[in-house]
Image: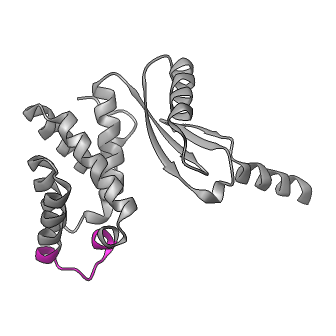
Amino acid sequence: MENSGGIQASLSGRYATALFELAREKGAIEKVESSLAAVKQALTDSPEFAALTRSPLIGRTDAANAVAAAAKAMKLDSLTSDFLGVLAQNRRLAALTGIVRDFRTLAARHRGETSAEVVSAHPLSPAQVKALTAQLRERVGRDVNVDLSVDPSLLGGLVVKIGSQMIDSSIKTRLNSLAHAMKG
């Protein structure tokens, strides 16, 4: 599999690539991608789960037991559950956010899509997401898989990353540019 974009150059990319290869062999890419979406949501919604993934004070066994319980509660597929256990044993749970992102990128490429990371100041409505996806599809020339996140510090607008290309139309950036221009 070709991994342009340097995904394999990072720790999260190597783990994501390993998980992707296993999922592809088992014909479970969609299941794993769905489970990882649930994990990503849990990292956002549950401060306890997020703390579990970042705390160096939690031992390997305790972390593995905790993620196994969390995986069961989230009804994750067995491959993703086992993978979380490996991350816990290797003390790599802190890389989970990057692993999810990189796996989604690999899965999108596998389907012939392009991934776009979109950060907005406020949650986007389904109609806004649909319009944005259509505009990005027109710009890139193929289907776009949009990964949404919210950063209130942007104040307004969007920051869109497609591969190495970034489109920053946030009010925060515009205000910073204006402040820099006024300093002379």
Magenta residues (range): 51-62
For residue 50, above or below residue 153:
below
Residue in view at x 28 percent, y 78 percent: 56
Can residue 105 be seen by looking at this rendering? yes
Residue in view at x 52 percent, y 34 percent: 129
For residue 104, above or below residue 138:
below
Residue in view at x 15 percent, y 74 percent: 60
State yes or no: residue 31 in magenta: no
The answer to whether residue 2 is left or right of residue 157 is left
Q: How many marks?
A: 0
Q: Position of residue 122 (x, y in %)?
A: 59, 50
Residue located farthest toward the bottom when viewing the structure as drawn:
57
Q: Position of residue 175 (x, y in %)?
A: 79, 53
In this orientation, which residue lies closer to the viewer: 53 or 148? 148
The answer to whether residue 118 is left or right of residue 145 is right
In this orientation, which residue lies closer to the viewer: 179 or 68? 68
In this orientation, which residue lies closer to the viewer: 57 or 184? 57
